[in-house]
Structure formats: C-alpha cells, structure tokens
C-alpha cells in the first residue's frame, strides 16, 4: 500500500480535530483540502525558542526565551475604552524584567503567579532596564509546545493564526504519522542518505534540532524533485510512444536552393533530427534550443515545407504580435514560391479579417497559419493540422503546449527557444521533450562589442550613435524596465523620446514602440524601422524576442541592471545580425557589487549558455527565469538554486530507475510507481480540461 492509497490522507480537512467547516473553507483558499495536503504545507521559517537566555544578557531587539518567576502581581489598567493593559514584573535570578500585555485580560486568570513560566518574545532594553511586550508564555512544567523548542512559522491566510496552524499540524501529524508508508524504497534511501518519511514530516514541522530539520528537508526535496522528474519522463514516454503522422520523405533541395545562404553544420544536424521524427510514425515532441541568431527560423520553415508537401497544415506560433508578424513577413514570400499558402492571425486583427483567415484554415485553403495565441483559440479549426511549432517557447508553458497539440489528429510538435537553459534545469523544464541544440552561429558574424557605462558617458554614447547613423546604421534604445507596471513603462519610454528628440538626437528620425500601442501602430513603426525610415527605435522590452533588422548595429539599454542577464542577452541579440560591427551599450545605474559583476559577465561573454549559468549562480532560477512566465513548476519545498546538489542526485537516481525499469520490475518501487502514475494521470487530466 502506498502513501497515496492511504485513504486517510485523502480525508477532507474538516474532519480533523481543530478544523471544522469554517476553517476548512479558509484552508481551501490556500489550496489545502485533505490531510495529505496539510502535512505538505511546509513552514516558511522557524523560530528557535529552544535555548534559554539570561535576562541580564538580553540584547535590545532580540527575541529570546527566558525562564521566570513573578515578583509582583499582575495589575490591570484601562486607560481607554477598548484598551486594557496588564503589567507585571518577573525575574530569572540574573535580572528583573517588566512584562506588558495589551488587551489580554485572560492572562490575569490563566497565570498562576506562584509558579514558574517560560516566556518567548522580543525584548527592549534601555540601560539595565529590560522590557518585554506580549510574550508567548507557558507554565514551565507543561512547556515544550510554544516555548523551549524550535517553532515552525507558516505562511498564513486571513483568519488563521500561527498558533492555530501549529495545533492543526500537530493534530494532523498525530493522526497520520504512524500510518505513513514510505514511497522511497529503503535501497534508494540508503544510497542517497535520505531520511524516512515519518521522521521527515515530523521534523520539517516540529524539528528537535536544525540538523534534523535539514535532514528532513533534504528528503522531502528529493522526493518532490524525483516525482517531477519521473513524472515528466513518464509523460515523455507516453507521448513519444504515441503514434503520430508519418510525413513523406520530401526532397528539400528546391527550398535550400532558394535560400541566400548555406545551412550551417549545426542546422543540418538538427534538421536531420527533425526529419527523422517527422518521417517516423512516432509523434515528434522536440525542443530546439539555439542561441539568439543561430538560425532557428529556417528549421521551422523546412519542417513546414515537409508538412505541406505531405499534404498537412502547420501552425506557427509566436509570443508577441510583432514577432508573429515578422515571421509572417519573412517566411511567406519564401514558401509562396512553392505554392504554399501562408496566413497570419493575431489578436489585434479586425474581427472580419480574423474570421476570413479562420475560414481559410478550416476550409484547407491555407497551408500555414502564423500567429499569436489566437491560434490556440477553440474557434480556430484546421482542416488537416499536422505540425505545430512554437517559437521562443519559454513563454508557453506545458499547459499551452498540450492544448495546442490537441488540435488536429496528434500533430507533431516542435518548440524553439533562444533562452539558454543550463542542462540540469532544462531537464526540469523540458523533461518531457527531446532536445536538439543549434550550437554554432552562421559564419561571418562579428562578435558584438559590449560596453558597460554610467551616466557620465551619456554624451559620448549619443555622439557614437550619431556617428554610426551617419554611416547608414540604425540603433535601438531600450528603456528601463519599470516595476510591474505597463503604464509606467510607457511613461518612461515616452519621456525618453521627448528628451532625446529635441536634444541629443535632434534631427534624427526617432520612433517609439511600446506594448500599449495598437497592433496596427506597432506594425507600422516596425515596418518603418525595418525599411530604414526610422533611424532610432526607442522601445520598451516588446522588442525583446526575435526582431530581425540586420542593419541595426547599436543596442543601448537603460538601467541595464534591472534586467535579467538572459533578457539582456536576448536584447543584445537584436544587433549583430548583419555584416556590420555591432555594439551593445549597457547603462548601469547601480553601484552594487552584484550588478557590477552581472554587467561584467555581459561584457565578457557572447555565449548565452555561459551567461545563463553565471546568472543562475548569482541570482537563482526564480529570478533568472521568472517562475511563472517561463513555466518553471512551482514547488512546495524545493528551491532549484539552493537545491542544485539534490537535483543532481535526483537526476542520477531517476535515470537509473527509468533505464533499469525499476518501477516495473522491483517490488520495493511499487509505491513510488503508483504515486508517479497517479500524479501523471492527474496532470494529464488537468491539461485536457484547459
Ligand atoms: P534565431 O535563431 O534567433 O531565431 P533567425 O532564424 O532569426 O535566428 O536567424 C538570424 C539571421 O541569420 C537571419 O537573418 C537568417 O536569415 C540568418 N541565417 C540563418 N541561417 C543562416 C546561415 N546558415 N547562414 C547565414 N545566415 C543565416
Ligand atoms: Mg527566432
């Protein structure tokens, strides 16, 4: 029997001692419904109340535990209506301390001043005078719950206090702990030095020492990451085992001949992998990783070509309208030479236009539909969808991926990303995909020169821009990222344009583009910049991904320290796309050591993978990838940066378990296998409901 078969863990919370209907409702807001859920509700921190301290040694502002006797009665005053104050004096033999409670009338009744107590609270000290307000207290004889130990601190929700949660967790653990079955087999536990499950749940909530807590935590992190890894590999197994379309073996020479360049070796290798997937009757589930400018788009075009010649439609998705439009403009002329019909569908289009395009897709008059998430909408119907491609995939989570691939009859799936992801993490993010890497850039690219500057260099920077523009080049200026407010982004961009137009860059053709503009206007600005009518493009980060204007050779980024390095790398990748020497100028307004280090990394490397690794080291994955946006799973306990070592162990263990088929063959792996199976089934169900 596995932990999960254990009906006890599925029991609704309301039946637990101390919960009831009302509190159960409060917990449901935190996503906690069952006993199993609540024991997985881990503390966010701990207060060490285990060590008693002498009052005489208490430091101002410190939280301490003290053993005291009362040297006075508890007095009560009522200075105002709605305010009562209880005061007393206590001692621990080293010094005296004044205690004050506010509005805690019950202390007078519940404290027996002839007995010894343990207090925990934050002290104030002025000279030799020590005070404590609203301490937590327990009679010494019955202490050990609230004081005298390490106490968990939970994330709270309205209506539930720390003390309530602590009691409820105590009850929950008392109810389940001797019935928990360990899903990790003993062999695995001893190999990786993992604590047992009952010990781990007890110690993570009510640690008897911080060492025990760390041991418990390591085991729980291991378990969480292992389940994820095995789950992803099961999903991968089931989807790659899925039958897909067997595309014809198409001669691609005509298309290659129409290109102005020869494919790089890396492109050829990755294309061979794509082709092998497409020609097999397995369904393709492939991730193409390749640094900015490595030439991924042409790989998509080749795949689309194969699909079209085989008689299937393709959907090609991009995360922004600008990017979708740009893809449309660059691939349509090429494909239409071969009578492959390409259409564009974005959210910003007029309703009439959208409907017409959708009808074309449904009637099979289109071979390729390029677009934003509008392509995902249920109302978009394809007559014969065979291939789905998503570009700059880091904005599309597993969920969207699954939803898209449900259109048509099991279309092949190709996802492309320029966000360089360290190998270990890519297994967590994309463990359900096969991965190909385009690891070289097309020949002849001059490495971009990157300079980190501060405001004192501003005049020289503008002069430099003018000089390059006089030579026929173009420049981007990216505005500071303003915290989480589109409106403020727009304001800062607009302000910047006003300032430079009449001043530093007077006389030049300066355009502005930001996310709040109508798509027709954005489109217009982009087109004018592409054609060279605009010489300087001031922008918020909307140009981040994929924009391709080879004549642009300067990228200036304001407040570069506010961006993630992966993002800076993306932005920098907008230049260096043509034959001209390109420059990236990073304004660093921060004096902090870490900022300086990060800017140095940018200046010293043009390799997205190196940059990502270093950024990860400096800041951790949450910041690097922006958990939500990049579809990094949310963990209950694991922290990918802090737990990188555990993750490595987990990947080793998972690989062994899968390759040896232990979950099928080895009896001791049954509980684990069953848990993975349930998890995957639940996940797939969730995905199909969305
Ligand atoms: P990304 O991988 O960032 O999406 P793109 O597909 O936009 O890169 O390609 C960047 C530029 O490189 C485009 O202008 C494209 O035409 C060009 N390019 C792609 N492959 C090659 C190649 N093999 N040789 C020369 N230029 C290439
Ligand atoms: Mg691209």
Image (cartoon, grey):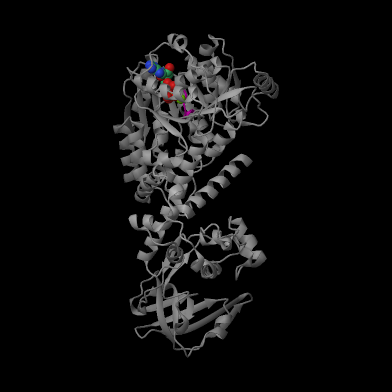
- Looking at the magenta stretch, what is its main secondary structure? loop
Where residue 330 appears, as percent x and y from the top left, is 50, 16
Q: Residue at x 59, y 35 (%)?
A: 403
Q: Residue furthest bottom?
A: 114
Residue 546 included in the magenta stretch of the image: yes
- Regarding residue 336, the answer to whether it shows in the image is yes
- Observer-nearest residue: 319 or 137? 319
What is the magenta range? 543-548
Where residue 481 appears, as percent x and y from the top left, is 47, 37
Q: Residue at x 49, y 68 (%)?
A: 178
Where residue 95 appears, as percent x and y from the top left, is 36, 83
Q: Residue furthest left?
A: 604
The quarter of the picture where residue 349 lies is: top right
Residue 206 included in the magenta stretch of the image: no
The quarter of the picture where residue 352 lies is: top right
Is residue 256 depicted above or below 496 in this figure? above
- Observer-nearest residue: 418 or 545? 418
- Observer-nearest residue: 479 or 47? 47
Task: Check the picture and name the quadrant holding the C terminus.
Answer: top right
In screen coordinates, is 464 left or right of 542?
A: left
Where residue 495 appears, as percent x and y from the top left, is 50, 32
- Regarding residue 641, the answer to whether it shows in the image is no
- Observer-nearest residue: 405 or 476? 405
Q: How many numbered markers are drawn?
A: 0
Is residue 576 depicted above or below 225 in this figure? above
């Amino acid at each position: 029997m596995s932990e999960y078969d254990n009906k006890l863990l599925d029991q609704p919370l309301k039946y637990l001692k101390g919960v009831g209907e009302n509190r159960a409702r409060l917990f449901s807001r935190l996503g906690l419904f069952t006993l199993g859920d609540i024991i997985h509700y881990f503390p966010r921190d701990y207060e060490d109340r285990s060590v008693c301290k002498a009052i005489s040694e208490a430091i101002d502002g410190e939280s301490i535990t003290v053993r005291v006797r009362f040297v006075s009665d508890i007095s009560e005053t009522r200075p105002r209506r709605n305010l009562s104050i209880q005061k007393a004096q206590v001692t621990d033999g080293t010094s005296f301390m004044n205690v004050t409670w506010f509005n805690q009338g019950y202390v007078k009744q519940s404290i027996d001043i002839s007995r010894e107590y343990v207090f925990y609270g934050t002290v104030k000290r002025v000279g030799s005078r020590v005070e404590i307000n609203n301490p937590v207290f327990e009679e010494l004889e019955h202490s050990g719950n609230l004081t005298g130990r390490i106490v968990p601190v939970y994330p709270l929700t309205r209506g539930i206090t720390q003390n309530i949660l602590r009691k409820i967790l105590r009850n929950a653990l008392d109810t389940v702990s001797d019935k928990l079955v360990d899903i990790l087999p003993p062999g695995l536990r001893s190999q990786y030095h993992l604590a047992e499950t009952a010990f781990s749940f007890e110690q993570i909530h009510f640690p008897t020492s911080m060492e025990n807590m760390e041991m418990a935590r390591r085991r729980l992190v291991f378990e969480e990451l292992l389940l994820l890894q095995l789950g992803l590999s099961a999903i991968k197994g089931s989807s790659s085992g899925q039958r897909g379309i067997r595309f014809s073996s198409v001669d691609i020479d005509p298309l290659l001949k129409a290109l102005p360049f020869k494919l790089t070796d890396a492109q050829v290798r990755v294309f061979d992998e794509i082709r092998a997937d497409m020609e097999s009757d397995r369904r393709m589930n492939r991730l193409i990783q390749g640094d900015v400018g490595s030439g991924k788009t042409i790989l998509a075009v080749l795949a689309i070509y194969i699909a079209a010649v085989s008689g299937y439609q393709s959907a090609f998705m991009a995360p922004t309208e600008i990017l979708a439009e740009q893809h449309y403009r660059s691939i349509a002329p090429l494909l239409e030479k071969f009578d492959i019909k390409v259409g564009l569908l974005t959210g910003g289009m007029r309703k009439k236009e959208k409907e017409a395009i959708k009808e074309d897709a449904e009637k099979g008059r289109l071979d390729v539909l390029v677009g934003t998430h509008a392509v995902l909408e249920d109302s978009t119907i394809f007559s014969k969808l065979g291939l789905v491609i998503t570009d700059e995939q880091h904005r599309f989570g597993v969920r969207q991926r699954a939803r898209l691939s449900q259109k048509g009859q099991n279309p092949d799936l190709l996802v492309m990303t320029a966000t360089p992801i360290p190998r270990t993490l890519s297994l967590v993010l994309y463990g359900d995909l096969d991965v190909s890497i385009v690891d070289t850039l097309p020949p002849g690219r001059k490495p971009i020169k990157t300079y980190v500057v501060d405001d004192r260099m501003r005049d020289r920077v503008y002069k430099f821009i003018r000089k390059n523009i006089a030579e026929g080049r173009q420049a981007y200026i990216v505005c500071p990222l303003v915290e989480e407010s589109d409106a403020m982004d727009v304001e800062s961009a607009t302000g910047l344009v006003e300032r430079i137009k009449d001043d530093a860059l007077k006389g030049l053709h300066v355009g502005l583009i930001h996310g709040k503009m109508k798509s027709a206007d954005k489109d217009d600005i982009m087109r004018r910049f592409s054609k060279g009518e605009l010489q300087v493009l001031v922008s918020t980060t909307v140009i981040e991904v994929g924009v391709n204007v080879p004549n642009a050779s300067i990228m200036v980024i304001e407040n570069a320290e506010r961006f993630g390095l992966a993002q800076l790398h993306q932005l920098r990748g907008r230049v260096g796309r043509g034959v001209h020497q390109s420059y990236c100028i990073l304004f660093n307004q921060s004096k902090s050591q870490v900022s300086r280090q990060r800017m140095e990394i940018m200046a010293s490397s043009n390799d997205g993978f190196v940059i990502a690794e270093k950024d990860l080291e400096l800041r951790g994955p949450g910041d690097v990838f922006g958990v939500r946006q990049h579809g990094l799973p949310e963990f209950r306990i694991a922290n990918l940066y802090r737990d990188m070592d555990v993750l490595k162990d987990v990947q080793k263990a998972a690989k062994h378990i899968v390759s040896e088929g232990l979950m099928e063959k080895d009896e001791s792996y049954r509980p684990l296998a069953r848990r993975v199976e349930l998890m995957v089934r639940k996940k797939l169900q969730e995905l199909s409901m969305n």
